[in-house]
Amino acid sequence: MEEKILFDKTEEKTFFDKMLSHLRGTCKYYTGYPKDLGPSRVIHFTSERGFVQLLHEGRPVVVAFTIRSNYSRQLDKVLEEAAAEFYPHVKFMRVECPKYPGFCITRQKKEYPFVEIFHSPEQANQATRDDPNVTKYSVKVLPFNYDQSPYGFREFFKRYGIKYSEESK
C-alpha cells in the first residue's frame, strides 16, 4: 500500500516567508535582502570647503574615494547601511574621483575604490602660519583595511577608540 503525501505549495511558501522574515528581523547583519534604511545618510562630496566644514563638526568622517565600477556599487550599499547605523556619531562621505580628481590625487593612491577615516581635527601650531587670516588644522587619517561592512566599521572604530555611538568610548 503506497501512501502519497501531497504538499500544498502555499504552505511551503508561507513557511519560507516566515523563515526569511524571522532571519531579517533577528539577524542584524543579514545583507541578502534590501533593508529599509530611510533617507540616505551618505554625504556627496561637492567641495573641499564643505569637507573641511564637516570635519569642524568634530565627528569622525568615513570617506570613500570611488570610480564607476561594480565594486563601487557594492561599496555604496555598504556605506548606505553603515551610515544609517552609525548616524549621527559618524559621518559618511562619498567622493566621485572622476568629478573631483584634484582631491583624490592628494590622497596618493593608485587603486580605487578605497576608504579612509578622518578624525580628531586639531588646530595646528600657530607659530608656523604664513598668513594671520588662515587657520591651519591637522587631522588624523587612517586607511580602512577591515571588512567592508557595518560590522567591519564597528570593529575598526573599537580598535582605534573612535566614538561611534552613545555607549562607545
Image (spheres, helix red, strand yellow):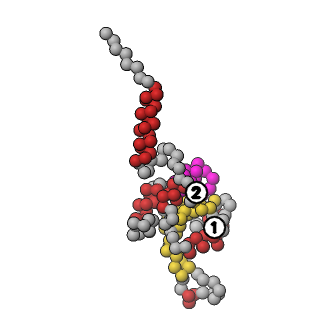
| Camera sees residue 43 | yes
Q: Which mark is residue 103?
A: 1
* Three-letter amino acid code of the residue under disc 2: Ser
Q: Seen in the image, is 82 located left or right of residue 101?
A: left
> What residue lies at 51% left-to-right and 65% top-to-bottom?
88
| Residue at horizontal 61 percent and vertical 50 percent from the top | 69
Which circle marks residue 40 in the picture?
2
Q: Position of residue 89 (x, y in %)?
A: 49, 66
Badge 1: residue crowd in 10 Å (few <14, some 14–19, many ≥20): some
Residue nearer the viewer, 93 or 39: 39
Q: Main secondary structure of the magenta part?
A: helix
Look at label 1 and name its amino acid: Phe
Q: Under tag 1, what secondary structure?
A: helix
Decide which of tag 2 and tag 1 comes sooner along the chain. Answer: 2
- Residue 66 picture quarter: bottom right
Q: Which mark is residue 43?
A: none
User: Is residue 38 rendered to the left or right of residue 2?
Assistant: right
Residue 31 in percent (x, y) is at 47, 47
Write down the quadrant of residue 151 in the picture.
bottom left
Residue 117 in view, yes or no? no
Where, quadrant-wise, is the N terminus in this rendering?
Answer: top left
Residue 113: horizontal and vertical position, in percent?
A: 57, 57
Q: Residue at x 47, y 54 (%)?
A: 149
Magenta residues (range): 66-79
- Residue most toward the top? 1
Q: Is residue 50 left or right of residue 155?
A: right
Near-viewer residue (55 or 115): 55
Is-magenta flag for residue 78? yes
